[in-house]
Amino acid sequence: MRIAASLPLLLLSACSLPLRTVIPPEEQALRRPENRTGVLVDGELLRISWLPPLSTPPQALTADPSMFVGVGGGSPGLWLVASRPVEGRAVISFAGPPAGWRGGLIDMQDNLWPALTAARAGSAFHAPLQVRLGGDTIWAVGDLVPEAVLRPGGESLATVELYSADPRQGGPRPLAPFSVIVTARRGTGGDEVTRRPGSLTLISRPDGFFHMARLERSRDGQLTALEFAAWRPDVGTVVGGLVASDVLGAGHPRELAMERLLTDTLVEWKTRSLPGWLATADAAALEKAIVAAEKGMLQLDLKSRLVKDEIDAAARQGAGSQPALTEKAQLYDQRKTLVAVVLGSLKSARAQAR
């Protein structure tokens, strides 16, 4: 009974912890640039950030670090970082979802969320850049976010947060980004392992697919420049049987838009670039291209058959028409026909080269 009676008192005491939103210079000097602005709560400096979903598969420890195994995509999650001074330096005392900080006390501490939001808005390190993404203006914020499992040496994940509106616009809770892209792992000494471009998240918008064409950070890690460009697939992979799920993952809502882009890319290349390439290619290059095209036709044929099997299975179960699956199968068949035309041109050029 005595223990039970003390719990409400402990919670009440926790809810009245003093907040300090002005960080003394001696406190700031202990911390890295990304963590010099926040809210002091009972000796801990708190700040908020964002990360995409994280996992810790066994292969994360042995895989190529530039592939960033364990860092996925999807809706970004709110993250809380806490640091505490220890023997003249600041150490990370907590990094994770806010509900985990001191057993969920963040939601019981009066005025803490508005104070954290205001501190983030006033942080020079997290100052947003206004950039163009397709036909839209968006805001980008860079960060270095420590994560307990993926930073065995105290490293942080370098991120770029993308917002549809200026995140400094205010409010009791921080504005959520529509995407967070992890671009590098940064060690305690400032050394970085950059993520391979092929493993970075493509940005899908109504007016197309985009990728980072330029990304610059200061020596301290602050985002200083960012540019996007329209994403175009490598035509060799399209000839080799690339499909939308290979690029976006299965079940992406704009899978058909990507399939159309792959088909359009192949049509344009076949008409505009293939004739010139055939005129200069030697026999070895032609033979390599022929093998790739034949393999691509087989891949597209197999994938088309699998989609048609799905359509038939749905019909047997009384699910009715499947317009999305039907269009996907048609697009596969169209690309198979285009690859067959390319293959014919390649074989004709090889015969003339002998």
Image (cartoon, rainbow, N blue to C red):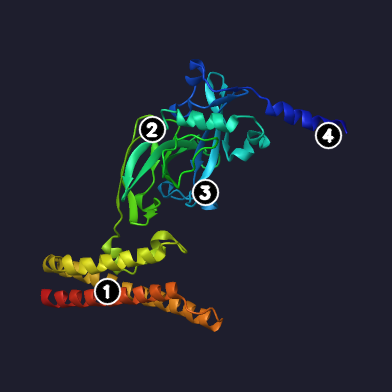
- The numbered mark, 1 or 4, whose residue comes first in the sequence reads 4
**Residue 284 in view in this figure:** no
**Disc 3 designates what residue?**
53
Residue 272 drawn above or below residue 316: above
Camera-nearest residue between 216 and 259: 259
Q: Give coordinates of residue 352: x percent, y percent.
A: 11, 76
- The numbered mark, 2 or 3, whose residue comes first in the sequence reads 3
Separation of residues labelled 3 and 4 (CA atoms): 37 Å
**Disc 2 designates what residue?**
222
Q: Give coordinates of residue 318: x percent, y percent.
A: 55, 81
Q: Quadrant of the C terminus?
A: bottom left
Q: Secondary structure at mark 2?
A: loop
Q: Secondary structure at mark 4?
A: helix
Name which residue type carries label 1: Val
Camera-nearest residue between 238 and 291: 238
Q: Secondary structure at mark 3?
A: loop
Left or right: 279 with respect to 29?
Answer: left
Separation of residues labelled 2 and 3 (CA atoms): 22 Å
1 vs 2, front mark: 2
Task: Answer with the quarter of the image where residue 78 lies.
Answer: top right
